[in-house]
Image (spheres, rainbow, N blue to C red):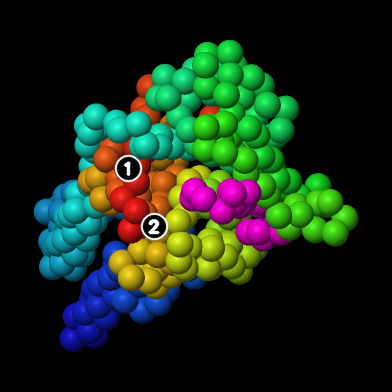
Amino acid sequence: MIRRLVAFVLVLAVAAALFVVLWPQQLDLQRTWPVAQLVSFRGAAAAVAGALAVVLFVVGIAARPLRSIAASLGVLLLVFGAVSIGVAAARGLGRDDFVEALPTDLTVVVWNTEGGAPGADVIAALAVEEGAEIVSLPETGADVATAVAEAMGAAGLPMTVKTVEYPTVGGSTPTSLLIAGGLGEYTVAVADDGSAVETTPLMPSVVATPVSGTGPTIVAAHPVAPTTAQMDPWEAGLRYLADACTDGNVIMAGDFNATLDHMAGLGTAGGALGRCRDVGVTTANAGLGTWPTDLPPLLGTPIDHVLATRSWMPTGYKVVTDRDEAGSDHRPVVAQLTMTGA
């Protein structure tokens, strides 16, 4: 009797834990440690759950006294894995067809370069290949970003460079944003001492606004990663980005260190963050992992995004998988946006 009770409690506890990892937003736990970390890798979690289920079924066959509890736990893990795969599939597992671009369309390239590791020539080659008007480069300093802009200019795509860094914050890395000259002049807010106004805590994001007042506000986003010691500034960074997209004409692109699960509750009017909608969702690509490159896209976590307000309609999106050996631990993403005027 006692053994059955212990087994029942164990199965119940495992079921509850799996539910929390599967859908933490139901309990508003999606931005708490360690749930935020566990929900990041749905594909990998499904694979691990499937493997553990097989082990439990084998144990149940080999050890008759454990058969019942092993079977129960195995079934729970299989259900968890199946639903995890279902969620990822519903968000999209890859569709890279692009509508033929209009002259007013914008192409956005995002690549966390891990300190410029691929080199300016490799970064520029991707941007030129895609004909990018906006290039968001988290973890990329001004020197590399300027070299990228020079290479793009030589290829007939003149760009201006905006870089923001927090020189007094230990461990912080710069974020750079390249904007096509044809979009007009952009400015980044500065404090009285000439330094950039702080945006996302610990890691900077670039918020560039058009000097003329015409055109989108462009944000190269990079909130800090959700490590154990940085959960609060990570969430504050996501909330900052949500507030930066409460209205108007906004395009955000970068390494958000967050999946759609983490963004739950931060969107309004159908947006993922504020009013900004996730382009990966709209184009059936939001289940593909962009980090780390050591894992296949189906097992990685989708934390690099392009988001935009309803002023822009996504007409193409892809996770670039042929630069996995370039040096960065992130995959680039490319989006094509058509102006709607909404």
- Observer-nearest residue: 242 or 202? 242
Q: Do we see residue 68 in this rendering?
A: yes
Q: Residue at x 25, y 77 (%)?
A: 12
Would you call the spot at circle 2 few (<14 residues within 10 Å), some (14-19), or many (20 or more)? many
- Observer-nearest residue: 205 or 331? 205
Q: CA distance from mark 2 to mark 1?
A: 11 Å
Horizontally, residue 11 falls left or right of residue 240, namely left
Residue farthest right in this picture:
193
Q: Residue at x 45, y 66 (%)?
A: 247
- Callout 2: helix, strand or loop? loop
Would you call the spot at circle 1 few (<14 residues within 10 Å), some (14-19), or many (20 or more)? some
Q: Which mark is residue 307?
A: none
Quadrant of the rendered structure where residue 310 is? bottom left
Residue 116, position as x, y percentages in the image: 63, 28
**Which label's residue is closer to the chain start, 2 or 1?**
2
Residue farthest top in this picture:
154
- Contact check, label 2 and label 1, Cβ < 8 Å: no
Residue 261, position as x, y percentages in the image: 36, 62
Asked if 101 appears above or below 303 in the picture, the reply is: above
Residue at the disc numbered 1: 338
Decide whether the magenta segment is chiefly helix, strand or loop.
Answer: loop
Q: Residue at x 24, y 38 (%)?
A: 94
Asked if 160 appears above or below 215 in the picture, the reply is: above
The boundaries of the magenta stretch are: 198-216
Q: Residue at x 47, y 55 (%)?
A: 250
- Callout 1: helix, strand or loop? strand
Question: Which image quarter is the N terminus in?
Answer: bottom left
Q: Do we see residue 261 in this rendering?
A: no
- Observer-nearest residue: 307 or 256? 307
Name the amino acid type tagged 2: Thr
Residue at the disc numbered 2: 309
Residue 226, position as x, y percentages in the image: 55, 58
